[in-house]
Image (tube, rainbow, N blue to C red):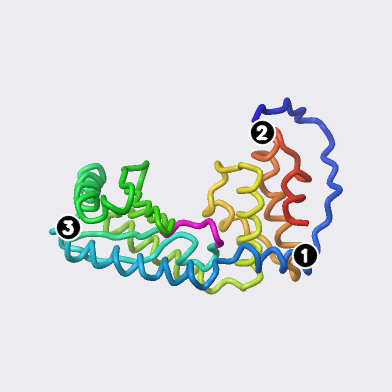
Amino acid sequence: MKKKKVNPYEVILITVKLNDKRLKAILKKIDSDPQMKQLYASKWHKIVNFLYNNTGLTIAKVAKSGSFAKHTEYSDSDLDVIFCTSPDYYLSDMQEIIQDKADAIFGDVADVGIGNRAVHIDFASPECNIDVVYLSQDEFDAEFEEIRDFKIIAPLQKDSIKLTKYAFDKVGLSEIKGYQIEKACLQFNYTTLAEYTFHNVKYFTGKIRKHGLTLDDVLRKLI
């Protein structure tokens, strides 16, 4: 998509209004269905078993991370699995180990590759994408504590995060990551789903406009 030129001094006009009833209807549509949740639960157990029994490593800890751990996942979310070992390894060395071992175990049914921070294990049928992320023991403890603290936020906030992720996904704003949306939401304190979601989207006005879009372009995906 060709980016529009954005005038930084242009007055931002917002015409789209969100309402709770419509947002709740969208939530029902985008929420992970029971079969998908069961599929990811099954893959979670397979990955844990793989790490402990097929890598030859001394696994210290394993946990879900990302949206599935924080209960902000929706139908297009991937499952992030974090783990650490005793002792710690260099990230690049560990990624090569996990890629080789995963390809040997899952290569016939999944595409396995190394990303920036994760080893991707993407199952084709049924489609199910897993990111296996190696952390040092200190990094693991810090992320696990963050996940634990996040779990206590209100369901209203979590629903708003799902809707914001969905809207950004629909307009192609892949550079705005889920964890950024989650951190932004924690800054707000509203009483309705519409207010939370509007301000979640509005928080990223700069990035939205840099992409050649307006706030209304994103908000229209939620009406």
Label 1, label 2: how far apart the Cα atoms are: 28 Å
- Residue at which label 2 appears: 210
Residue situated in front as seen by the camera: 180 or 77: 77
Residue 22's tag is 1
Residue 25 left/right relative to 19:
left
Displayed quadrant of residue 171: top right
- Residue at which label 3 appears: 55
Q: Mark 2 Cα within 10 Å, few/some/many (few <14, many 20+)?
A: some
Let me know if residue 141 is in the magenta part.
no
Magenta residues (range): 74-79
Residue situated in front as seen by the camera: 72 or 140: 72
Q: Secondary structure at mark 1?
A: helix
Q: Nearer the viewer, mark 2 or mark 3?
A: 3
Where does residue 37 sit, x and y in percent of width and height?
A: 47, 69
Residue 197 left/right relative to 78:
right
Quarter of the picture holding the N terminus: top right
Residue situated in front as seen by the camera: 13 or 73: 73
Residue 101 left/right relative to 11:
left
